[in-house]
Amino acid sequence: MSVLTTYARLRAAEAGRAEPLATVRHVHLAARPFVLIPLALAGEACAPLAALVGAERERPELLIVAEPRDRTQRFAFVADLADRVLPHLDSFTRDTEEYTGRRDGAKRILTRCTEAPQILVPNPGGIAFLRLLGRSTRFRGTEGPHAVPPGVPLLGKWLTWFTDRAEFPGSSQLLAMTEALSVHWATGQSGTEDGNLASLIGWIAPPDGHDGHEAARLAEDPALRPPAGPATDPVFDHTLHELLDRYERAGTDPLRAALRHQLEKQLRSQLAPTWDLMWRGVDLLRSLPPGASVAGRWEFDRTLFTDYAAYLAETGLPQARRDHAVGAARRLARLEDATARYELARAYDDPLVMAEHELAGRAFTGVVIATDPSRMVKGPRSALFRPLVTLRTDALPPRLELGDKVKSPTRRDQPARLLAVRALPDGDAEIDLELEGGLARKRKPPAPPGCVPEPGEELCYTVLDTGHSPLAFPDDEATPWTHGGPPTPYTPTEDDADEAWE
Amino acid sequence: MPPLSYDARKIAALTTNPGCARRAVLDAAGIDKARLAGRLGATPGAFTQSPFALTRGRAFEALVKANGYAELITLLRAELAAPVEEARVADLAAAEGDRASVRTRARATERLLKRVIAEEDSRLILDHPVLTLEIAGQTAYLEPDALSHRIGDRIHVVVIKSFAAIDGQADPRKTAAAAREAAVHVLALRRTLTGLGASADLVADQFLLVCPKDFSNRPYGRLIDLRQQLDAVEHQLRRLARAEDLAGALDADASLDLSVQGDQGPPVVSDDHLARTVESLDYLYEPGCLDFCELSRHCREKALAAGAPARLGGTVGGDLPGLDHIAVALSLAHGQAEPDEHRREVVERLRAAARLRARCLGRGVAS
């Protein structure tokens, strides 16, 4: 958060309506997202209670556990869920495309899926719940005592993979709707309150005749807007408690069927409002045009999806309970790298994000007032073609220094260098830049039209650089003692699945 | 109406928003804040516990203490390297009969603690003891789940919770809440022991957290350091002694009496009167209050009416030093007013933000 966001929040609070924080969409939205709203039983570590799932807005499917305290039933629920999720994932593995990439240290022609699945949950709590569900199912045996259907551990591995990917900024494979919306809108309430999907959407798109404050207050009433899970409303839990007890005691099948029907009705009433909100969230996000780098990030998501699907088809070992030191260090480096790349790409994609950097003095926007498109300067051996551009800007960027390399988001292939800054009496400033490339490989004037900015053009320049290379790690065999020496490959043990059934 | 007494949770909550004089006074006076919120026409914060959570919590505690506390004793051995010799358990919830009042149980606890002090190799575990703590002229009765026997000449507070530790990691927020409660218990126990002439060092500054392991019911225990929480709670308790001073600023006719005449008659003190008294107590609303204070939604409305930027969250408040009204901050940002010397810097930044946003969104600065 910066003063820019703070100011946006103040305005939202005053106007009673959310303010945009982005001019483009920074997350990918699949054509057919899979919406998954899990509910959990209070008090248990990971007892699924119900879920409303599906990739079609008009056809939500309700899955419930009639006896959530019974482990056998819990895994039966997971098997049900696997029957919905796995075919959806599978449907993306058929169409593939070829690309050139590196594998085992050499360039190769590889294939990846042309589309990949995307799972949407209401909030970060939903992601945390799926992570636990993955942890509790991926080690389960499909033979022997307490055997579960093969879909259960397979779904467990996929959920673990999705929730792991969700930690990487820029990945759109598993998104929490509240977080995706908060990236794009600032409300006139606190971040804590934004965690409530209903009140967040109440701010972004208040119903007719209400402002954001009122919409958010209405949304806070659990009787009107049940919580978006995974925790249920404690008041609703009393109804649920009674129904579950009656179900457990019910002697006859018809009675059980009737009670199950009632349970389904109750749970559907808790989930249906959130289902609508999820799709309204999808609409809101779709109303924004995608940022320029979104497709590239999604391509990376597709590649990773393809690779993991292939891994599951071949080896398919579950993820270890804990990373070893080397894996953890690599993961941390990848996370840092992904964060830096994502932040940078967002700034280049979106002037409103770049404005944060302008405010911090790492960028400026100005209007071109003069150019010298045929300027030549003395080089070490021969004269160099270095056109000059002069811009006028309304604020002096404090963090820029003469000689800094700068780039413009709209002219990414044209490096430039800051030559001079002249403060003007009215507070404005004139800035001279020399262009060091992006001149269609010309070594002397004239440059083809469009290569040199024209007077009157408004341009943003920043010192933020996209040319950033990730940290290099030694090979596994060369792992230093600080990280425990060369790691032993993970093999699942009996211990991993060891867990009392009752 | 009998005042509601402090419990460990309430005392711990005070450390979460220590600057709120309203809460300090209301708690010191033992006011039922949920009822008060209702009388003020606000929705009380919903802090009811789910029946599932309650059942699960009780079942897990029963499991830890089943078969002569076998599981608890095993954990004490594993985590605290307690010798294998048999330990005895005094169940203070049952010892004096189910209907024993907290006072009787507190006296019984004190008797047993005297014995524990006297015998260096005492092997007595106290289950459901009752400790007392003097807070702002009121005696709070606190009920830790258990106190360990003397191991390495230290007594440990034991907290039994039903949230799971998965692969050795429990929910950090819940763990932190448990630690705050444990700190209150440690403090109470130390004061009791020094009152009995023993050293406060007899109580460890770590507590044993017992919770279910992974997705099972098997208990898992870990020692957790409490020094930081102890400092925070001690500091708050010293401050609390001043709750009476805070209340001293109230008008002579101020009243927080929530009782009604007869059985269901009209209230003794009118709603307006209550509201006046509450409003005369300074509050410090921040969004975090919504997580623990029954009166938070009432204060939120007041903060909204007062235009306080802090209700938008700590970072917003922190970005606006010296600006305590949203509309004022905006008019300064839009150049409709001029700041004084102290606020020039923050207003300059706001103005830059306003300019940038106006340009990016293609609209006028204030439109």
Image (spheres, coloured by chain):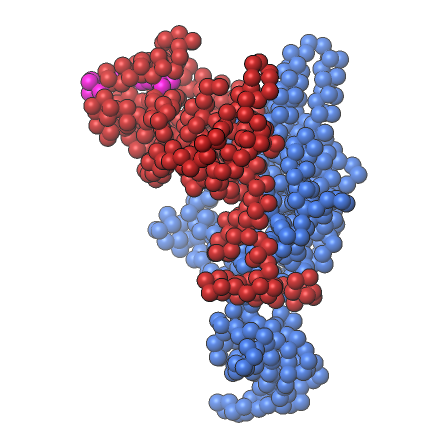
Chain colours: A blue, B red
B29 with respect to A120 (left or right): left
Residue B120 colored in magenta in the image: yes
- Which percent across, then down, holds residue A330? 47, 52
A434 vs B128, left or right, is right
Q: Residue furthest right?
A: A58
Magenta span has A28? no
> Residue at position x 23%, y 21% from top?
B196
The number of numbered discs placed on residues in the rendered structure image is 0
Which residue occupies the foreground of this view, B16 or A48?
B16
Q: Residue at x 60, y 27 (%)?
A: A234
- Please state the horizontal and vertical placement of residue A324, each as a whole percent of the image: 44, 45
Can residue A386 be spotted in the picture? yes
Residue A131 placement (x, y as % from top left): 56, 38
Q: Position of residue A476 (x, y in %)?
A: 44, 53
Q: Quadrant of the C terminus of chain B?
A: bottom right
Residue at 47% x, 60% y is A471
- Specify the quadrant of the image occupied by residue B11: top left
Tell me where residue A455 sits by quadrant.
Answer: bottom right
- Give above or below for A435 relative to A343: below
Residue sitting at x 30%, y 33%: B205
- Outermost residue on the front side: it is B252
Q: Is residue A316 visible?
A: no
Furthest-top residue in view?
Answer: B97
Above/below status of A101 relative to A446: above
**A405 and B190: which one is in front?**
B190
Stretch in magenta: B117-130
> Closer to the camera, B326 or A478?
B326
